[in-house]
Amino acid sequence: MCLAKNSNWTRGHIQGLKPPILSADFGTTKVVPFRGINSVALTRAAIASLALPILAGCNMGPKYQPPTAPAITTYTPQPQPAQTAASAGPAGAAQQFDASATIPAAWWTLFHSPELDRMTEQALADSPTLAQAAARLREAEEEVNARTGATKYPTVTGNASVEREQENLAAYGIPFPNPSPFTLLNGSVAVSYALDVFGANRRAIEGLKAERDYQSWQFEGARLMLAGNVAAAAIRQAEFGKQIELTKQLLAIDERELAITKARNRAGGASDAEVESRKSTVAETEAAIPPLEAQLDQVNHQLAVLMGKSPAEAEIPALSLDALHLPEDLPVSLPSALVRQRPDIRAAEALLHQASANVGVATANLYPQIVLSANGGGIGTSFVAGGDIWNVASSLAQPIYNGGALRAEKRKAEAAYEEANSVYRQTVLQAFGQVADTLTSIEHDAQTLKARSDAASEADVSYQIAQGRSQAGGISELALLEAQRQQLQTELDRTTATAARFSDSATLFQALGGGWWNAAPAATPR
């Protein structure tokens, strides 16, 4: 029966328990006539004596209860619109928010980019960061196995020794010839088992299992972060590539305008100030290209590292921003579902569970520790028969005075539990904040893209009109080039807004947990 079934876990004693004993040993030792080292019967009897007294124990400390799911149903103060604004051109489709939509495990495939798929799959296969997380998970699993085996079952240790000796009787003052050399044989088996009456070992194993769960969610979080980083870097790569292309086209226009202005200056139709102004414009446009190329190189280097390769050996494909597909159906999980989906929240919950188990360990350490032990074996020499030796004992140890150390350890464990609970709550709040930020960004960036697309459309119309007037001789080449320059500048602005929509969509899938629960069972080690 459980001695403290109804006791309060915050108390350090059991009502009605008799005065504690510092230590006690109860057992017998017997030597019988030697019948050889083969004392299997006695050894088996000793082991069986430990297997019989299995006592029903109880677990001290609080019984862990998962945190209650949040009651809120939205992430933002204002209701989220059913869909975003739509605009003309690439990535201009309206995105629908659907609370019932599912997130595929390979969510990056929704961008319909074979290059992105290959880079993500290679990163998940070869990333050292992910390998570290997997190794830590295996460590935690083996720690559970080791502690379970060491505490759940008796410990059996075999000992054997053989000694060759020669006695010198003269050294003892015995005037007889020395006996012949002889061999001393000794063999025994020792068995011990700690009765986990108050659940200290069970709580410790519970805590180790929670640590294993924590490492499992850390592994899942590492996978999610890795895939998200690859998607974000790939989108930036496509954005920088498009920006470099458009900026070089702007530079070509600026250089043509400078050449025309110089020719006019030589003919007396333009001042030196106009020439210098054109030179300044060319220099500014030219200066914008190297930083973009540096950012493109850096993001390619980042992709190489994410894929587990050095920048020198990795083959990074070039993504086209216009070739990416914008996911039009966006899932929006309820907050109550999000706390079960996000790996970082589940990891924080595992730490909370571990802290709860540690309270139980610290509480159980205030109570007696009971250990059963037995030894069986034989001793003899090559010419004198010895005997079988066996021992069966039990011991009980109860802390009496340790300067309040054990109660302080219990209070420390309780404080750690409160800390873990606060960390869990903070993790949940940060997750809700991230989802709210992403949803707001998706809505606002769609509006920004619409404005940029409208400006680009107006610039296209102006350029077409300028082309017609130029062909009719109504405007100069400089005026036509200015119209073309304005068109490219609005397209450059539109590129930034387009990339933001792709990035927001990838961030949302990551913020919602990444769909790991829809993966094949073998894809996630548990």
Image (cartoon, rainbow, N blue to C red):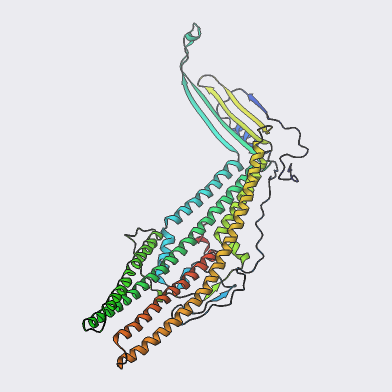
Q: Is residue 71 left or right of residue 235?
A: right
Res 392 seen here: yes
The one nearer the camera, 24 or 403, is 403
Q: Is residue 401 left or right of residue 259?
A: right
- Residue 39 in the image: state x and y as whole percent: 58, 30
Q: Is residue 238 above or below residue 259?
A: above
- Residue 480 in the image: state x and y as whole percent: 32, 85
The one nearer the camera, 111 or 38, is 111
The one nearer the camera, 89 or 41, is 89
- Residue 373 in the image: state x and y as whole percent: 63, 33
Extreme residue toward the right, this view: 16
Image quarter where the N terminus lies is top right
Q: Quadrant of residue 403?
A: top right
Q: Count numbered badges in the picture.
A: 0
Res 341 seen here: no
Extreme residue toward the bottom, this view: 472
- Residue 189 in the image: state x and y as whole percent: 57, 32
Image quarter where the C terminus lies is bottom right
Name the residue located 73 percent from the left edge and 43 percent from the top edge.
2
